[in-house]
Structure formats: structure tokens, C-alpha cells
């Protein structure tokens, strides 16, 4: 498989306030779904912003398709990388279709407006995600889970090669978490390259092909899910004792973990 993303000896810090993370090395191949785990403050969101080109690294390099991101223009990066943030609030009551169509911005000129083709593409993506019924509804009036799906549709409208998800289920209830995770899993199964940060280790077994764990002292481990999702690595990452359990539901085996308290 082709290497889509390579992070080499990456370090980042805000001004003189010390480093948020250092010496991070991560590789993501085409069609992989990498889950990024770590406690609050370990730099997961900051790392995604570095990959997206928003924050420049203090040292190290990030390569997309073998090319240093410093060599890409903002528009070029926007056509390759899409990002779905934890939260988004629209300042105006746009319809959901209008929000999705905003994903075409990297392809428009300074004074150019979306074409009929852009609108048709946006609507077809909403149909594919099963949210076409939200097209004319105000984005500010739909549920949190529905908003996340609209944002995923907007990102797909960019036609990116890589999608970054920044803790996409953090503020959602149980049902909406399941709805968003199912959509991300479907995108992964269709061959989209995905990097997703999460506060929920159990999500990794549901949707990830690979995992990278960041602790306060840097990278703990990375690799295939079944090789890296161990009690030892989880305990080191979160600095709390973690126990992994295996269960069966019908013909399906389920693996999950929990913190252990004395």
C-alpha cells in the first residue's frame, strides 16, 4: 500500500511554554484507519492541527504522499486533507445542504459561487450518508449527532484523500455516538484513509485498523490494533491500571477495557 502520511521526529510547543509533544513518529498507509489515543494534554488535537497545516512543527517533518506539507499551498492541502472537529457552531442558520456545499470552497475562485454541480454533489453525498432528509433543515436546529454527520458530509464534499477526526463523539449521547462511529467505519471500509483521535479506547476495536498511543512522555506504542491494544500499553498511556475483557454476543466476540480501581 502507498504511504499517505508520515510524521517524523515531530515536536511542537507554544512559544516558550515547553513542548506539547516531542519525537513523534507515525506512519499511515492508504486505506488505513489509525486511532490516536492519549489522555487530555498529551497533544492529540494539536498533532491533528499540525498534520492539517494549521500549526507549524517546532522540529521534525510531516509528509503527505511523500511530499513535505511545507511544500503544499493552503488550497492544495485543503484538497487532500479534510478535518472534522469536536464541535462546530454556525454563526448563521444555514441549511444543512448549504453547510455541506461549503466543502467545495477549495475548488472555487475568489468571487466564484458554488455551481449547480457543486450542489448536486453535496446532495448526493448526503444521500449516501442517509441524511438527505436534513438538506433543507437549519443546521442550528438539528441534533448533535446529525450535525456531526453534516460535517462529515461537508468534509467528503472536499473530496479529500485523508480525513482527520478530532474526538468526533466526545459530546454525543450513546445513540449519536453509535451513528457517527458507524459512518466512520463505513468510510474506512470503502477505502478512505482516516486518522481519528478519541477519548474512548473501546472505539478502537470497533473501527480501527491501527492505533497510536500518546502519553505525557511521548509515544507509547503504535501498530496493528490487536498487537498494540494491550493492558500494558493502555496502563502506561493513561497512567491508570487497565484490564481488558473478552466476551461473546451470539456468534460475535467482543473485546473491551476498563480502568481498575482498588
Image: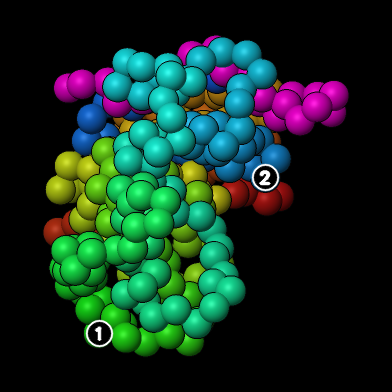
Q: Which residue shows up at 36% across the image and 17% down it?
A: 67
The image's mark for residue 133 is 1
Q: Residues within 10 Å of mark 2 (few under 14, many from 20)?
A: few
Q: Which residue is mark 2?
A: 40
Q: Earlier in the sequence, mark 1 or mark 2?
A: 2
Identify which residue, 11 or 38, lies in the foreground: 11
- State left or right for residue 110 relative to residue 47: left
Residue 116: say if magenta: no
Q: Which residue sits at x=47%, y=58%?
A: 168
How many discs appear? Answer: 2
User: Of tags 1 and 2, which is closer to the observer?
Assistant: 1
Quadrant where the image shows the N terminus: top left
- Residue 88 percent across, percent down from the top left: 54, 65
Question: Is 144 above or below relative to 181?
Answer: below
Q: CA distance from mark 1 to mark 2?
A: 36 Å
1 and 2 marks in contact (CB < 8 Å): no
Q: Is residue 225 left or right of residue 188?
A: right
Where residue 132 appears, as percent x and y from the top left, is: 22, 78
SS at badge 1? helix
Percent position of residue 157, x then y: 28, 56
Q: Quadrant of residue 35?
A: top left
Provide the secondary structure element on which disc 2 rests.
loop
Locate residue 56: give its quadrant.
Answer: top right
Q: Which residues are magenta?
A: 1-22
Residue 121 pos. (x, y %): 18, 63
Q: What main secondary structure does the magenta stretch of the protein show?
A: strand
Residue closest to the far front: 111
How is colour applied across the structure in the image? rainbow
Q: Nearer the viewer, residue 140 or 184?
A: 140
User: Which residue ends up furthest to the right in the rendered image?
Assistant: 16
In this rendering, the answer to whether 80 lies above or below 12 is: below
Amino acid at each position: 500500500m502507498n504511504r499517505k502520511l508520515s510524521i517524523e521526529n515531530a515536536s511542537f510547543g507554544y512559544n516558550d511554554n515547553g513542548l506539547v509533544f516531542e519525537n513523534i513518529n507515525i506512519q499511515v498507509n492508504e486505506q488505513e484507519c489509525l486511532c490516536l489515543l492519549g489522555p487530555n494534554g498529551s497533544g492529540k488535537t494539536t498533532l491533528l492541527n499540525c498534520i492539517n497545516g494549521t500549526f507549524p512543527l517546532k522540529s521534525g517533518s510531516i509528509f503527505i504522499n511523500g511530499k513535505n506539507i511545507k511544500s503544499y499551498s493552503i488550497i492544495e492541502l485543503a484538497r487532500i486533507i479534510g478535518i472534522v472537529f469536536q464541535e462546530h457552531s454556525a454563526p448563521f442558520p444555514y441549511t444543512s445542504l448549504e453547510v455541506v456545499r461549503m466543502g467545495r470552497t477549495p475548488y472555487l475562485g475568489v468571487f466564484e459561487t458554488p455551481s449547480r454541480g457543486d450542489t448536486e454533489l453535496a446532495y448526493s453525498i448526503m444521500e449516501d450518508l442517509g441524511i438527505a432528509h436534513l438538506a433543507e433543515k437549519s443546521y442550528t436546529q438539528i441534533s448533535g449527532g446529525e450535525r456531526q454527520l453534516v460535517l462529515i458530509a461537508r468534509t467528503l464534499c472536499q473530496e479529500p484523500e485523508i480525513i482527520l477526526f478530532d474526538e468526533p463523539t466526545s459530546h454525543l449521547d450513546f445513540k449519536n455516538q453509535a451513528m457517527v462511529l458507524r459512518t466512520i467505519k463505513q468510510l474506512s471500509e470503502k477505502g478512505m484513509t482516516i486518522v481519528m483521535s478519541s477519548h474512548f479506547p473501546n472505539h478502537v476495536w470497533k473501527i480501527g485498523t491501527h492505533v497510536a498511543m500518546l502519553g505525557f512522555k511521548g509515544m507509547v506504542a503504535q501498530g496493528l490494533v490487536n498487537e498494540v491494544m494491550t493492558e500494558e500499553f493502555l496502563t502506561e498511556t493513561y497512567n491508570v491500571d487497565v484490564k481488558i475483557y473478552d466476551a461473546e454476543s451470539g456468534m460475535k466476540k467482543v473485546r473491551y477495557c476498563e480502568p481498575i480501581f482498588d
